[in-house]
Amino acid sequence: MPVPVWFSDEPGLIEPRAFAAEIESEMAILCFSRRIFALLRTFLGLPEDRPAPRLPGAVEGAMDSRVVLYHSSFGSPAAGMLMETLIASGIGRLVMLGQAGSLSSRCRIGSVVLPSFGVREEGTSYHYLPPAVECRPSPILFERLRTALEPIAPVEGGVWSTDAPYRETRQKVELYARQGVLAVEMECTALMSIAMYRNVEFAAVLVITDELFREKWEEGFQSENLRSAEERVSKALAESVDYLIQNRLTAEGRA
């Protein structure tokens, strides 16, 4: 599939550090749902009277010395700006908890997906990596996230990120499913690509909200299966923060 060649080896003219803030946390967690943000803040025990700094792309945030949690605006440009500003603020380890549609009968509403590679159909990543480069999570952080979520038994496979959710077609769903892609959403491949470009640690986990592999689209945005899965993943992630941040992940684990 031909794509525009937007990547340049030259440094950007606008420096993310111009928008950076003082953040002493060890890692960041990004999510895109007010419901998930509330769950994570509760399970992490983040005080409501200590909001995180307002950064580009963020809706709201909370933090302590271990973790800074942000509810990001959805879409790759907003999430990418938030990630860039966090990196400029000294954060070198980031986890994304997102929501996605399923391309496979292996993943039903409420299933949990651990993306191991990405199909790039958003525009942001092409400013960070050439078109031929496949984006992936950071290996060691991915392994730690896999261990942390082992009791939930996430399904591992590819993720397809798109800027046009209303143009997810049957042909594309079937094509990408044959390539091992399990889920579609809007931000993951951009954040993988930024992490690879900036040499920081990033991995993601997705909760399935709807199913595209059936003859007709089936959604479960308010279903009990989804709410239960979001709670289980948020709790597991919160309980694993110390494990995810202990020591500095080695250079070999970086993308």
Image (cartoon, rainbow, N blue to C red):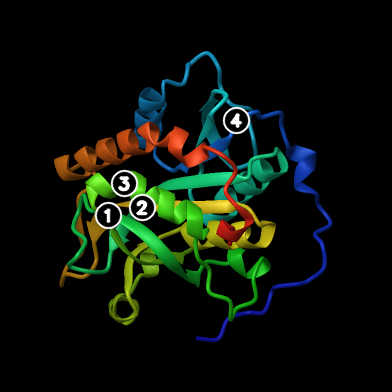
Residue 196: percent from the left, percent from the top?
A: 61, 62
Q: CA distance from mark 2 to mark 1?
A: 8 Å
Q: CA distance from mark 4 to mark 2?
A: 22 Å
Disc 2 marks a residue whose amino acid type is Arg
Q: Secondary structure at mark 1?
A: loop
Choose the circle earlier in sequence order: 2 or 1. 2
Choose the circle earlier in sequence order: 4 or 1. 4
Local packing at callout 4 (Cα closer than 10 Å; few below 14, some 14-19, many 20+) is some
105 left or right of 155? Answer: left
223 left or right of 97? Answer: left
Q: Which mark is residue 146?
A: 2
Q: Which mark is residue 149?
A: 3
Identify the residue at image location x=16%, y=69%.
214
Toward the viewer: 212 or 157? 157
Identify the residue at image location x=32%, y=75%.
180
Q: In which quarter of the view is residue 90 placed? A: top right
